[in-house]
Amino acid sequence: MNRRIIEENVFKILMLASLAIVLGSLVIIVGIVVINGFPALSIEMFTQTPTGRYYLGQGSGGILNAILGSLFLALPATALAYLIGLAIALYLQRDFLHPWASSFIRFTLDVLWGIPSIIYGVFCFMFMIMLGMRASLLVGIIALTLLEIPIITRYMDEAISMVPRGLKESAYSLGSTKFETAMKVVRRQAFPGILAGVLLGLGRGIGDAASILFTSGFSSDIPTSIFDSTAALPTIIFRFYTSPIPAVQQRAYAAAFILLMIVLTISIASRLLTRRFKKHVIK
Amino acid sequence: MEKKKLLWLIDTKLVLAIVIIFLLFSFILLPLSFSLLFLFLITFVLLYIFIKKHRKIRDFIGTKTMLLVTIIFIIFFFVMFSFILYKSMFILGTYSIFDILFSSVWNPEYGQFGLFPIIYVTVLVTGIALLIAVPISILSAIYITEYAPRRIRKTIRPFIDVLAGVPSVVYGLCAYLVLVPLVKDVIAPWFGIESTGSCVFTAAITLAIMVFPIIISLCIESFDAIPIALKEASLSVGATKWETVKKVVFRASASGIISSILLGFGRAFGETIAVSMVIGGIPRMPSSLFAPGQTLASLIISAYGEMMSVPLYESALMMVTLILFIVVLLFNIVGFAVLRRARRRGKF
């Protein structure tokens, strides 16, 4: 009897320890980024582009080009992925597609969710070379869209499949067509889930470095057209974190701080907004 | 009835026509077939915008647009796979697949493309990462589902979601700032080995932390699916909580746990940025755990820029991408197949 209670307690302690490791690593990550990144912040970081040359750029200046570049990359990519993902997710309902086919597509999407982003990057890079283009905002957006489609679609699909059958049927019984029902009834009913999916995709897209590192290139200027190459926050971190010059390294730390804050904000916003919009859902 | 049948015929014929057109053209010219599909898409969208009065036609167009998007998307990923396959075939004309997989010198300038040390290090790093991550994650998941009070449980979940959402480049930076000096100054000297800190061991720990949230959230899901009656039956005959966990929870959710490990493996195997920031980047056989190495994914990222110069080099890197793709794909397919069965069985 005694042995069993000892075993119970030993494992309880082990569990608490492992939970402490998991949560501790999160605390350490946030702590390290804040400790290193916060002192590096200044008004110039947000309002100026870097002066001086790449990597060894001595001069002052900030990372405005990377902040804007990240937004220019991630926002259009998320919008595109939203449109494509919405079409696929709505079409996966039983009203349109045979369950056998939709289960195959769901499986494909699940599998694609786990594909490392570097593969999308390599694919887009090779395609870009084949078409004779140069690293640009456009190619970066395409790579990010490909990365985000499985994430957003799968999330939307979960939300859409929760829509009660009766709701759709009452729309049909009033004489609306399938497409009208999907767009005007199902989409609105599933809106909180769709929003959460889009925000999740945005968070993933804005933080991903492997797919845009070579497809969107690098530039110290703010991009003026979609054929310009551009810097982004993850690119800045990856390229500058080992820089021997403190000013440049500070930019990497500041970029990490800003990126983490953006990702945290998105994750909190997704929780709050989902809760808020759930009010309008018909139970 | 008659009309419905007609519509159904159009439906199937349209799908067949699209697929056949695609197959026909894909042998001749891939971009052409894709532009054809996009042409369809644009026509549909334009038609939808301009036809306002006929609701039936609008419905037809809208539905078919969604179908077309779905088809394009699914085909696209097969195209992506075959494109990488096609590009990596070039090197097989010069070297045999065994030469590439099992010879141990990676030196592209001299035409030596041995991937063995890189594959070895990749498997080693992923294996160590999982050895660390799996017990910790499973124990935390058990605590969260079985032991923790409801309030604590609700507060912990968002933190794990946040951990899953931290970008990998931030993980890499933190590992570079914390783990690298730690390994260099404390852990490696403790074993009596000189190390720069950027090594296989550091990469493995970084990966383990990155895999935590995946395994934990999948385990929580499968532990939650176990019916409470099963646990209560065990508790009512006098088993302690841990005995219940050991004999009931683990067995009932075995497939869920296995799938979470497989999916975690897939994620760790393909992790690129964070690993390449801390592993040292030397494609040789590591002499110890504290020696630098190179994984498949980080090799791609470090050789990206220079790979356009030599066609054979480019093809070798495509081969690396292909291996990465296939391995991750296999693990994901098996993992999700197991998970799917577990989910279906979970609906008691």
Image: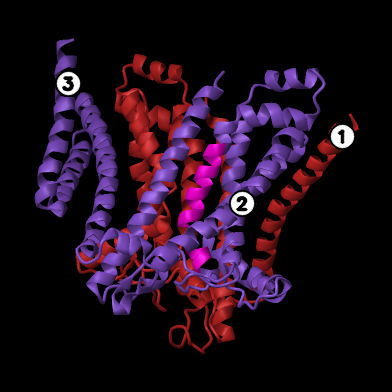
Chain colours: A red, B purple
Circle 2: element type: helix
Q: Nearer the viewer, residue B83 or A262?
A: B83
Give the magenta-colored segment's residue range: B258-276
Q: What residue would you read off at disc 1?
A: A3
The residue positioned 66% from the left and 46% from the top of the image is B135
Q: Nearer the viewer, residue A210 or A249?
A: A210
Looking at the picture, how far across and down is residue B276, in whole percent? 49, 68
The residue wearing badge 3 is: B7
Label 3 and label 1: CA atoms lie apart by 72 Å
Same chain letter for marks 2 and 3: yes
Q: Which of the numbered marks, if any, corresponds to residue A45?
A: none
**Does the magenta segment cover residue B256?**
no
Q: Which residue is mark 2?
A: B131
Q: Is residue B120 left or right of residue B322?
A: right
Q: CA distance from mark 2 to mark 3?
A: 56 Å
The chain letter under disc 2 is B
Tag 2 near tag 1, CB within 8 Å: no
Please determine whether, in this image, residue B296 is positioned above or below residue B151.
below
**Which SS class for mark 3?**
helix
Q: CA distance from mark 2 to mark 1?
A: 27 Å
Secondary structure mostly taken by the magenta-highlighted segment of the chain: helix
Q: Quadrant of residue A225?
A: bottom left
